[in-house]
Image (cartoon, rainbow, N blue to C red):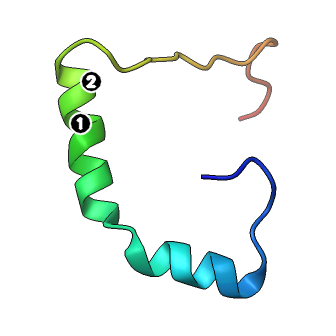
């Protein structure tokens, strides 16, 4: 894929070719194989509230 933004028609063509669920399953397989990057996000300050 290009590094620049796609125009409207190019974006539509690109999205029409994508298999989103295949990408999801590939990502799950990658995580299970240890290749996925896992990140824990924590606030820099404590929680303030009730």
Question: Label 1 to label 2, Cα distance in Å?
Answer: 5 Å
Q: Quadrant of the C terminus?
A: top right
Q: Quadrant of residue 22?
A: bottom left
Q: Closest to the observer: 10 or 45?
A: 10
Identify which residue, 46 or 44, lies in the foreground: 44
The x and y percentages for residue 42 are: 64, 16
Q: Residue at x 53, y 73 (%)?
A: 14
* Residue 20 - label: none
Residue 16, given in percent of the width and then of the height, sits at 44, 81
Q: Position of residue 2 (x, y in %)?
A: 69, 52
Query: Is the residue marked by circle 1 packed among few (<14), some (14-19), or many (20+) residues within 10 Å?
Result: some
Specify the label residue 28 is tagged with: 1
From the viewer's perspective, is 16 left or right of 25?
Answer: right
Q: Is residue 24 above or below residue 43?
A: below
Badge 1 vs badge 2, beta-carbon distance below 8 Å: yes
Task: Residue 18 in the image: state x and y as whole percent.
Answer: 39, 68
- In the displayed structure, does residue 48 sit left or right of residue 21? right
Q: Residue visible at 74% across and 84% down?
A: 8
Q: Element under label 1?
A: helix
In this figure, what is the number of numbered marks?
A: 2
Q: Residues within 10 Å of mark 2 (few under 14, many from 20)?
A: few
* Left or right, 47 with reference to 30: right
The residue sitting at 18% across, 17% down in the picture is 33
Q: Nearer the viewer, residue 49 or 32?
A: 32
Instruction: Tell me, for residue 31, which label it has, or none.
Output: 2
The secondary structure type at the circle numbered 2 is: helix
In the displayed structure, would residue 21 be above or below residue 34? below
């Amino acid at each position: 894929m290009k590094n620049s933004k796609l125009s409207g028609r190019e974006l539509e063509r690109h999205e029409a070719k994508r298999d989103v669920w295949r990408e999801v399953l590939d990502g799950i397989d990658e995580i299970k194989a240890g290749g996925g990057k896992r990140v824990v996000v924590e606030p820099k300050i404590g929680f303030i509230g009730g």
